[in-house]
Amino acid sequence: MTKSIYEINEKIRRKKAVVLTGEEMVSYVREHGVKNAARKVDVVTTGTFGPMCSSGIYFNIAKTSPKIKLGGGEVTLNRVPAYAAYAARDVFLGATALPRYEKNRIRPINFKYGGAGVIEDLIRGKSVLLEATAYGTDCYPATSLRKSFKLSDLTDAVLFNPRNCYQNYNAAVNRSDKTIYTYMGILKPKMGNISYSSAGTLSPLLNDPELKTIGIGTRVFMAGAEGYIVWHGTQHTTAVKKKNGFPVGGAANIALICDLKKTSPDFLRAAYLTGYGVSLAVGVGIPIPVLDESIARAAGKDDDEIFAPVIDYSQDYPYGKEKAIALVSYKELRSGIVKLGKKEIPSFSWSSLKKAREIAAILKKKIRAGSFLLGDPTAALPGAGRVG
Amino acid sequence: MIKKRLVLKFSPQVVNRPIISALSRKCDISFNILQATITQNKVGRMILEMEGSKKNIDAACAFFKKSGVSFQRLGEDIKMDEKKCVSCGVCIGYCPTGAFSFDAEKKVVFDPKKCIACEFCVTHCPYNAMTLKY
Ligand code: SF4
Ligand code: SF4
């Protein structure tokens, strides 16, 4: 038996849709079986909240007189360099951009500000100083600009992720003799700790592992706003090793977009990673329509069925020689202690389960209230499977 | 008058010396020993609450330094800003004394009683949710 997104949307409109969060779906499937779940449940909501460096914003500044052509010039925002190689008034700011003074501090650098900090300042309503130099043309004579602005002063401001929602991810350890500072955190020598970054059973793309329902045009919860999947993410792939039908490691991911003005600091936060850099934590939730039994089965899996590869970040990762030391389940990672051979290693997470739950709950509420309809994808992601 | 709680560390070289009795003779402060232990490798660890004028407490600290006793403030001065904390749990992996844990709702809770004010979380919480209040 299969359903269509159209049919489910009709039920959502009539406020008749059966919606469960990813965690509730686990118990439902355990109790009633996959067949019943596929028949009864219409939508499973997911959520994730963790740092994603592949994030940025773009916006268009207000007209000035004399006019200035930022394109080809140089722009900083609160001294953080932004990208200005589009048209006259377009600016792109990446989350990981750093002001020069940050890079000159003693190592490991304890980062205090950067692109993500500017983004957070903007959504908190603070004013940001734009400083620009340009070469000046006949139609855009100004050669410099210094101006403070707030998010509300901009006509358009857009949050964009070239890549987000990795289907699954590595668990990181350090096999060397000294502490290392990575994007997976501070890793103690001789495998003294292990870090991971996934919402596990709530992770959006793990609830539709074959990408049967998620595609270009899927409407999502993004940092408190409504956003959309606009493309597959950079580094997207479906040709990966699987266990229990779920990819082990990176795999699929998506490019996301939304209106920055509608985002909330509750779900969009600058993250400062000692010795590594500045990143942006973006809360994302994707509703998964339960179109067939295989989706019900995937959405009903528990943390003990999904596995992360344990990767060494001291030698293997930096030199592109990633080789899984072992596979560990998210159940084990979440328990706080991972057993590798005879060693018991304390684990910690970059992904907030509390926030992920909040997001899945918000989405559920909105869908049940009929105020969030599912986006019917206009095109599939590369390597996507088919319903039925 | 100020109050200060310190965690003192006595290395094996100084652990047998009568430092605390010297402290009571030399510095005009009142103090309370909240906890004292000696580990297997002969390192002494004491949690000391001192009360007195700022000048005298500074003098006591200088005395510890001179006597080869290392010290740091106890975690009462370490605060979690609930609005900034996202409950990621990174600090659980960083804190040497297990002062952080998940509650049933997966919210990260901070137990100041376990904190020894090493300030690791203050420096390394990615969301700047931990602060040291002087
Ligand atoms: S690392 Fe910081 S934000 Fe994360 S749980 Fe600990 S205090 Fe909260
Ligand atoms: S200051 Fe040190 S001991 Fe106290 S909570 Fe932070 S990391 Fe733990």
Image (cartoon, rainbow, N blue to C red):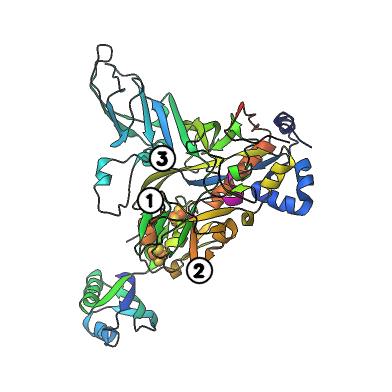
Residue marked by disc 1: A318
Mark 2: C-beta under 8 Å from nearest atom of ligand 2 = no
Residue B132 seen in the figure? no
Dot 3 and dot 1 within a common chain: yes
Q: Secondary structure at mark 1?
A: loop
Range drawn in magenta: A196-204
Q: Amino acid at mark 3?
A: Glu
- Above-or-below relation of A6 to A95: above
Q: Secondary structure at mark 2?
A: strand
Q: Position of residue A29 (x, y in %)?
A: 74, 50
Residue marked by disc 3: A120
Dot 2 and dot 1 within a common chain: yes
Residue marked by disc 2: A344
Q: Of tags 3 and 1, which is closer to the observer? A: 1
Residue A213: quadrant of the picture: top right
- The answer for how far apart the CA atoms under marks 2 and 3 are is 38 Å
- Decide: few, some or many residues near mark 2? Use Cα within 10 Å; few <14, some 14-19, many ≥20: some
Residue A76 seen in the figure? yes
Q: Amino acid at mark 2?
A: Glu
Q: Give the mark nearest the N terminus, 3 or 1.
A: 3
- Decide: few, some or many residues near mark 3? Use Cα within 10 Å; few <14, some 14-19, many ≥20: some
- Chain letter of disc 1? A
Q: Is residue A200 magenta?
A: yes
Q: Of tags 2 and 1, which is closer to the observer? A: 1
